[in-house]
Image: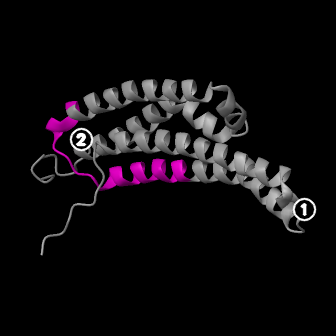
Amino acid sequence: MERKNKRGDVTDIFVFVLIAVFLAISFIVVLFVNNEVLDIISTTALNESSASSSIIDSFELINTQTVQRGYALFIGILMIGMVVSAFLVRVHPAFIFIYIITLAFAIFVSVYLGNMYSDFIAVDEIAVIANQQPMINFFMENLLKIVLVVGALSMIIVLSKIFGNPEGSVDSIA
């Protein structure tokens, strides 16, 4: 029975960028809907129940703290996972240029995706929600720097294993 190769590779940086942008936009949209539901609960007959203050407090906690902390935790775990998976990758030195080109392309894509997020949160209705999410905004405003640092660090780890080979030959890598 063949064992699947579950080690990291050069495409991890693309997956990271796409997940970070997708989650940021998704969370902002969910928080927008959550805010609308909160307005309905607090302005209708549902506000007259004894549990309404607890429900309103829970919604406000989710809207202001829980989602952004969850996003920061998930993105942090993804970054650590990419660096850790770089220790598990063994590549041939011929792939150095592919790593460099892939990292450059990921940086290029992250610029456009970061600007897309900025345009998205510039909408007046969304801006109200996005201003309450400083952690998500921090990660998205610095997406280029984060991709550069994490991508370069994982590339350095992968490539240092190539050139730091104790036997001095490439044959032991394959």
Give how far across and how far down residue 53 sits, in percent. Answer: 87, 61
Label 1 belongs to which residue?
Answer: 48
Spot the residue most to the bottom. Answer: 1
Would you place residue 73 above or below residue 15 in this image? below
Q: Residue type at mark 1?
A: Glu
Residue 56, quarter of picture: bottom right
Which sits in the foreground, 98 or 110? 110
**Which one is nearer the viewer's eye here, 71 or 160?**
71
Q: Work out which quarter of the rendered image holds the N terminus and state it.
A: bottom left
Q: Which residue is mark 2?
A: 163
Residue 174 location (% of width, % of height): 12, 53
Residue 45 in percent (x, y) is at 85, 58
Mark 1 vs mark 2, CA separation in Å? 69 Å
Q: Which secondary structure lies at badge 1?
A: helix
On screen, residue 25 above or below 108 = below
Amino acid type, callout 2: Phe
Q: Residue 49, percent across and down?
A: 88, 66
At 50% from the left and 35% from the top, the residue drawn is 146
Q: Nearer the viewer, mark 1 or mark 2?
A: 1
Question: Which disc, if any, is residue 15?
Answer: none
> What segment is highlighted magenta in the picture?
74-97
Q: Are marks 1 and 2 in contact (CB under 8 Å)?
A: no
Disc 2 element: helix
- Neighbor class of circle 2 (other Cα within 10 Å; few <14, some 14-19, many 20+) is few
Q: Residue 126: which quarter of the image?
A: top right
Q: In the image, is 139 to the left or to the right of 157?
A: right
Please state if 50 lies on the left or on the right of 16 as rendered: right
- Is 170 left or right of 18, judged from the image as shown? left
Question: Outermost residue, front direction?
Answer: 45
